[in-house]
Amino acid sequence: MAYSLPLSISLKAQGWKVKIRDRERVEPPHVTIIRGTQAWRWSLRQRHFLDATPSPRQVPSELLQLISENYDLLVQHWDAKYPENKVNNSESEA
Amino acid sequence: MRTFVVSEHTSFQISDQAQSKTTILRPHNAIDSLLHQVSDAIWISNDFDFLLSALRKQPRPILERQTHLRKNTVLFLRGELASSKRAPLESLFKMLIVAPEASTLSLDEAVEVFNAQNAANLIVSGTLNFRSQTLALLRGNLEKLVVPLSAFKISGDGVAPRFDQFQITDSGQTLSFGNYEASVESLLYEFDANYRRQINVEKSKTDKRLGACLRRLRLQKGFKQSDFPDVDEREIGRIERGEVKTPRLRTLQKIAAALGINPEDIQTY
């Protein structure tokens, strides 16, 4: 089952979601922040946004704080879904 | 494209979503004049009978003088439509899309997607074909994307797609198959070369070396470095690490063949 990070009532009411789905772009490991027709990929390795558009500034700091607080849990869910490309794998395999 | 919603929420309502707010148009001459005046528009309805009755209520029966109305108008109809009932609508609209409600976005979400700047990257409806083992997806720009059902592999934690429970969620960004969810973006990335070219332009900051591209491609396809029968896994590792900057063409051809792509496409990933 896709993992959805539980959010505060206000963030949910604004339509925000944070997901790790069962089929994602595998590399690099990330969570997807979704609101309406827009999505932001946030890297679990580098802990920053992967794409310049849409603007990361549109994502509320409260949401980013929540992601940081639940970082280990998100890594755990990514690693379970994508064991062949875990967050803490080295960039290149031997 | 402008989007008009024909809905039965009121006795007769057409909402023009091209404006910043929803506009309720006058019932008389509304459909008639709009069909004449607006050449690029998507009309959306979830009720064929209501739509047809609305068309028939026009001051002049437009169904009887339809030939010149077929401009670049599209009718997107949510629900079922008997083939015998298609003819009057097919003669009015240039394109008629009939999508089953269960595998289509809600009316509101469909309007949102058709009007989104990234409409091409969002899915409005989908049709499963078990005979060909494919899923045909309709994008917000009205183009199709066909993906094999084999693309939806069981996830690492054992969640399998239930194709009989197919739905489109997250305003066209996610395909749900029961508990299994697939990102539309991952499908575009894998099955639409134009999409990859577009994001390659945007991702100037990310690594576009051959090795990094090969690594992203290999992982996306679910291959291990040892899964290439004709190429030694140490060689794959060396290429990915950038130790071999210009691999031999024959090696690239073998790698590409195993991954089911053209050698020149490796660096688009």
Image (cartoon, coloured by chain):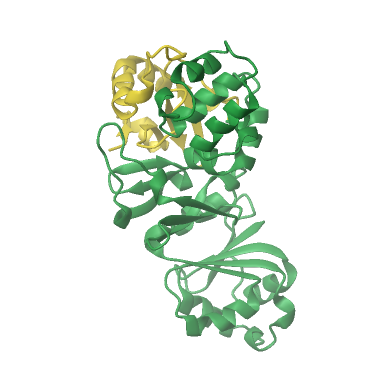
Q: Quadrant of the C terminus of chain B?
A: top right
Q: Which chain is yellow?
A: A
Is any atom of residue B209 visible in this view? yes
The picture places residue B14, in percent across and down from the top left corner, at: 57, 67
Is any atom of residue A38 visible in this view? no
Out of A61 and B210, give the one closest to the viewer.
B210
Quadrant of the image occupied by residue B87: bottom right
The outermost residue toward the left is B158
Quadrant of the image occupied by residue B254: top right
Vertical order, B116 against B28 (above or below) = above
Residue at (59%, 47%) from the top-left corner? B120
The picture places residue B4, in percent across and down from the top left corner, at: 59, 63
Out of B266 and B151, give the one closest to the viewer.
B266
Chain B in the picture: what colour?
A: green
Out of B184 and B56, give the one closest to the viewer.
B184
Out of B168 and A83, give the one closest to the viewer.
A83
The picture places residue A90, in percent across and down from the top left corner, at: 42, 11
The picture places residue B266, in percent across and down from the top left corner, at: 59, 31
Vertical order, B210 against B69 (above or below) = above
Quadrant of the image occupied by residue B102: bottom left
Vertical order, B134 against B81 (above or below) = above
Is residue B84 toward the left or the right of residue B115 in the image? left
Q: Quadrant of the N terminus of chain B?
A: bottom right
Q: Tag count in the figure?
A: 0
